[in-house]
Each structure stands twice: as C-alpha cells, then as structure tokens.
Image: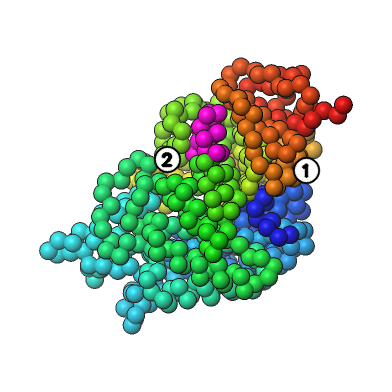
Amino acid sequence: MENWWKSAVVYQVYIRSFADGNGDGIGDLPGLREKLPYLSSLGIDAIWITPWYTSPMVDAGYDVADFRDIDPSYGTLHDAEALIRDAHALGIKVIIDIVPNHTSSEHRWFHAALRDEANAKQRYIFRDGQGTDGSSPPNDWTSAFGGPAWTRLPNGEWYLHMFAPEQPDLNWENPEVRAEFEDILAFWFARGIDGFRIDVAHGLVKHPELPDAGPRPEDWRTQPHPARDQDGVHDIYRTWRKVAETFTPERIFVAEAVVPTNERLARYLRPDELHTAFQFDFTRAPWRANSLRDVIDDAVSQAATVGAPATWVLSSHDIPRPVTRYARSQPEFDVQPEWDRARWSAEEPDLELGKRRARAAALLQLALPGTAYIYQGDELGLDEVESLPPEVRNDPTWAQSGYTDVGRDGCRVPLPWSGTSPPFGFSPEASHADPWLPQPEHWESRTVLDQQNDNASFVWLYRSAIHLRTALFPAETELEWLGFAGQVLAFQRGDSQCWVNLGDEPVDLPAGWDVVLESSRTHGDSLPSDTAVWMTRSPF
Ligand code: NOJ
Ligand code: CA
C-alpha cells in the first residue's frame, strides 16, 4: 500500500525484552519470529525493531560494533532475513534502527583510531584539551547520560561522545563516513527492510568550531545546542532519501530528532528529506486536557506544513511507562522538560488510576490523524518497574549520572507472556533461565495469555481499537474539535467522534451517538472521569 506510513500503527519491539527463543534469558530473533502471529492478531501495520547489530551492549545495542551483522545473542543474519520474510508474509512491515551518530568503541574504525592508523582518527572527533597541559576537555559539552562528553586517552588526546564513553561520535564532515552509511542503508534495504528509524537524527553534524554550550538547563533536550539540529545535517538526509528511492516498494525513514520545536522538526520532513519523525510532546504532556489539546494542534499543523503525517508516541524504551506516569499527580507545565524519574519517586503511584488513564490515552492516541507508535508492553498495561535493585541496573545513565538517575531499565523489563510466576513464558519453559532484568511478581495478572480472552483487558482494548481505527477514523479525515473547554477533549474525524474526560466529574455524552469502544465502563449517557470513548452516529 502506497503511503502506509502516513497512518500506520507501528509496534516498537525492544528485542532484548520481547521473547527469548533459545533460553538464555535474553530476547532474540527466533523468539520474535515465534510471536509474530500475536503481533499480527493485534492488527498492527509495522514493527520497529531496536538495534539488532553486533554490539558489546553497553547501551543495549545503541553501541554498534558491526552495522552489517546481527549480535550473536539475538541470532544470525539468516534469522534476520527469515524474520523479514515471515513478517512480510503476515502483512507486517519491518523498520529497523540505524545508529549513525556514533559507533561502539569496539567498532573496527575506533580500534584503528586508537592504533593511530592513517586517516583513522578523522572518522571520529578527536581534539587536544584546554589548559597548559591539555588536561581540561576541549569544550564544556555534557553527555546525555551525565558527566562530560569527552574522554581523554592515555596519549593525552580527547574524543567526543555525546552518550557513553563507549559510544564515540562519528565525524560526519568526513566523506568516508557518509559513504559508509549510504552503503549500510543499501545493505539492509536490499535485504527487504521497509525503513529505518534514525537514532539521534539531530546530532550528526556539529558546529564546526565546537563552541562551549554554556550551563545545561533543566529542559536541555529541547534547547538549541552546537551539537544538535545544525543546518548541515539536512544534506545527509537528502542523500539518504536518494538511496531509499532506488528501491521498490517504497522505503521510508522515521527520525528520532529531538529539536526545540515542531517547526524545526518539520525541516527534516521536507519533500526531499525524511518521510516522518517522532513528535515527542504527546509523551511529555501531562494528563491535562488543555496541554494535550495544544500539543495535538501544534503537531498536526506543523506536520501539515510539509505534507508529513503527525506522529503520536505514548512511550518508548527511553521513557517511563504511561501507567506509571499517569499514576501520580500531574505537573502544572504544558510540556515536561524532562522525563523526570527522580521527581516522581517521592510520591506513591496509584497504579489503578494510572491504568485507567493509560487506557483512555490509548484510545485518544489511536483516534488521532497520523501514525501511532506503541511500545511493547503498553498494550499489556505494564507499569514502570521502579523496584529494580541497583545491582541489576544496566542502563549507563545510572553510573554516568553518579547514581542520581536510575535510568531507563524500568521500562525495559522482559514481557510477561504466560504463567503465574517469572519468567512468565518469556523464555522456553525448560530453560530455567532468569530474564536479564527481573520481572515483578504482580505481572501475573498482566500476561498476554491471561489477557487475550478477557474483554476488560488492555490487550483486548488495544486490539479492538487497532482493528476499528481505520473504519472509524479513515486515514485522510481531518480532526475537528467539538468546541469543548474544561477537562474534556472531544473531536470528530469523518463520521466518528472521540471523547476523553480528563477531569474529576462525569460529563454528558451527546444524544444521537452510540459508543462503539470505551476505555472504562460508561454509564448510559455519561462519560466518567479518566475515560475515553469512540462513537458513531446512531442509526435512525
Ligand atoms: C536514543 C535511543 O533511543 C536511546 O536508547 C539511546 O541510548 C540513545 N539514542 C543513544 O544512541
Ligand atoms: Ca535468547
């Protein structure tokens, strides 16, 4: 289908935690292949698989040592090809991650740089330090995970890493780097993948003088920075678009570009650049009608300026689970400057409330025009695992922040598939392997098997919504607000309406409309608090 990506439901597979086929406690490609019928039953259009490349796994695979092979813990190139084939046979498109901002420090290029082979250092960003003995970093940039963005080698030189020290940033001024990635894109396109999610798409080009950035504000991710959103990055994507266009059927790109505004984001989506990009404000918005409404309007109108679809992200492997985000008091500000895990830990979560709101948020998300991204496990109503003991924490953020930010492990815990105790069917029964992160006992009630035939479950809601979405809200229909103020979001698309009550009091539903899908039980003509409904006109 042409333009499938403009209205697709994309399911994010965090491969390490999806399903373990060989019984070592780590998710893998055989495990994912086995569960494709489940994904197909949900009715999704595409999967996006987080990095599957050879990697020392310092940053869960976002530290790539070989972009043309599969990590042995996930399987083989043959498994990847079989997965693509199987997914296509079920009508599911396959998007994979490409990580062009940095490599692993175990990549052969970085090894060559450390050996000081001819021209090897020019593939990365090496500089002398400041001060008479060069012992201060070349500038004041900080890593996204905490601490300085520079590491000094024994020979006194510094290299740049905007993430972990094991993720040296590539030098995109070097034509060899550009040529290498064009070749990597073609390598995977030729194997049948339908698109790439571009990691850190905003970061490849740095300001040529590497100037100081100044002190890091709380909302640093969306503030201008000399290492982010530089105009020169667009040339790269114009070239990538040309590579994609040499393949049929259509191959697409989705950018993870974290930039100050949707207006800046739209620049990545000009007709000769990328197809689509995550709009993260939806996930950053508190559970407040006015905030969400502003976020929705801005996302839709800015995407429209370049003819791109709006994109709706409720969570990912980098963001606390919605059930837990919505289980605590909601911040006053419209868009949260940070996915601030530390701030929340002081307040006991009300998970029942969080689940209720997350169900309503799912119906809102899936009724909006554009592409919807579902992070694995959200369709099971999983909560953030906040109780992980420090010794099992894996995310480099934990150590690099000086043990102040617990990091992202809490949303990366392996999925519960079946059974009444860990590993909940994540690994084959006979294996006795512990999942790579421990699952909480209370997930007993959240397994796929337990939910599949229960019409009050999360899975049932997601599956129903995904199956009804296109019939009720056809791709090309625009959103019209129904003129409500207060804590209600109500809009019509085509002949259907979506209503969400974010307030404390029930509100009346209009006469002449029938509820087709509800996130929680509605009573007659009234919409209870923290509930969403989809409605069609009553027959007369
Ligand atoms: C964004 C990815 O989503 C995140 O998981 C990763 O740590 C960074 N990019 C660095 O690659
Ligand atoms: Ca495994």
Element on which disc 1 rests: helix
Quarter assignment of residue 505: top right
**Which of the two residues, 384 or 420, is positioned nearer the viewer here?**
384
Specify the color scheme: rainbow
Disc 1 residue type? Answer: Ala
Quarter in which the C terminus is drawn: top right
Element on which disc 2 rests: loop
Tell me the tag on residue 471.
Answer: 1
Image-based side of 305 in relation to 85, left or right: left
Residue to which mark 2 is pinned: 338
Tell me the tag on residue 437.
Answer: none
Label 2: few (<14), some or many (≥20) within 10 Å?
some
**Which of the two residues, 227 or 340, is positioned nearer the viewer here?**
227
User: Percent from the top left, x then y, of residue 507?
Assistant: 65, 19
Q: Which residues are magenta?
A: 283-297
Q: Are marks 2 and 1 in contact (CB under 8 Å)?
A: no
Characterize the magenta stretch by its predominant secondary structure.
helix
Image-based side of 140 in relation to 304, left or right: left
Q: Is residue 284 magenta?
A: yes
- The answer to whether one can see residue 166 in this image is no
Quarter in which the N terminus is drawn: bottom right
Identify the residue at the far top of this view: 505
Structural distance between the alpha carbons of marks 2 and 1: 36 Å
Residue 494, compared with residue 427, is above or below; it is above
Residue 383, compared with residue 126, is above or below; it is above
Disc 2 residue type? Answer: Glu
Between label 2 and label 1, give the one nearer the viewer. 1
**Which of the two residues, 416 or 276, is positioned nearer the viewer here?**
276
User: Percent from the top left, x then y, of residue 76?
Assistant: 63, 69
**Residue drawn at the location 26% of the way across and 58% of the way down:** 211
**Residue drawn at the location 44% of the way across and 46% of the way down:** 261
Give the mark nearer the N terminus: 2 vs 1.
2
